[in-house]
Image (cartoon, rainbow, N blue to C red):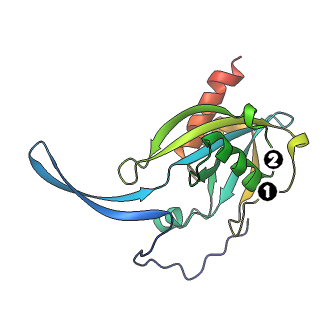
Amino acid sequence: MNNIIKNFKTGQLKDTRFVHPVSITYNQNGNDKSWEAVKSFDSVAILLYHEEKDAFLLVKQFRAPVYLNNKNHLCTYELCAGIVDKDVSLAQIAKEEIDEECGYDVDLKSIEKITSFYTNVGVSGGCQSLFFANIDESMKIHSGGGINDEEIDLMFLPVSQIEEFIFDESKAKTPGLMFSFYWFMEKKRSK
């Protein structure tokens, strides 16, 4: 991915579609308190293991909030993921994200739930459901990259390199990505 970022500006957020900044006031144990928060969608994320390559398929993309805080990170390394914005099962949303972002048609029954956890608990409190799926080249239906203007690049990370990758602080990564590697090594690799 060749990211050239120009005219990067911040402004007030109005009429939002995906996140809604709010001010919260409440009383806790007799003390009045206030908090700034963002109401956002829950999400799904999927660890994709490519059996033939013995590698994980990750997505790389520019994330403006990460860039806002650190101009050295032109992209983040993430699991295939998406927001929960429709009334279908979480596994179905995961299947659709795998298709859209990565170009693989995975059987819905083969998508395994790992766990769920809360992201950005101090700000948004959104719940992310983490899934796992095996992929191989027989499932490849297109090149991936997302829909509309997502500009997602795909990257295969060999399983043998995950420890080095996890501790490489020059790469912006999500906690869910690193946790899913741990889960894979404990639950799948050790069998």
Residue at 42% in and 79% down: 11
Q: Is residue 123 above or below residue 150?
A: above
* The quadrant where residue 138 appears: top right
- Considering the numbered disc 2 on the image, is that residue within a helix, a strand or a loop? loop
Q: Residue furthest top?
A: 191
Q: Which residue is mark 1?
A: 144
Q: Earlier in the sequence, mark 1 or mark 2?
A: 2
Figure label count: 2
Q: Residue furthest right?
A: 138
> Are the residues at dot 1 and dot 2 in contact (C-beta closer than 8 Å)?
yes
Residue at 33% in and 63% down: 22
- Asked whether 17 or 176 is in front, the reply is 17
Three-letter amino acid code at the position of disc 2: Tyr
Q: Residue 165: where, in percent of width, then height?
A: 64, 43
Three-letter amino acid code at the position of disc 1: Gly
| Mark 2 crowd level (few <14, some 14–19, many ≥20, 10 Å Cα) | many
Could you tell me which quadrant the C terminus lies in? top right
Q: Residue 132: where, in percent of width, then height?
A: 67, 35
The answer to whether residue 154 is visible is no
Q: Which residue is mark 2?
A: 104
* The quadrant where residue 134 appears: top right
Residue at 87% in and 51% down: 141
| Left or right of 36 on screen, residue 115 | right
Q: Residue 68: where, in percent of width, then height?
A: 48, 68
Q: Residue 144: where, in percent of width, then height?
A: 79, 56
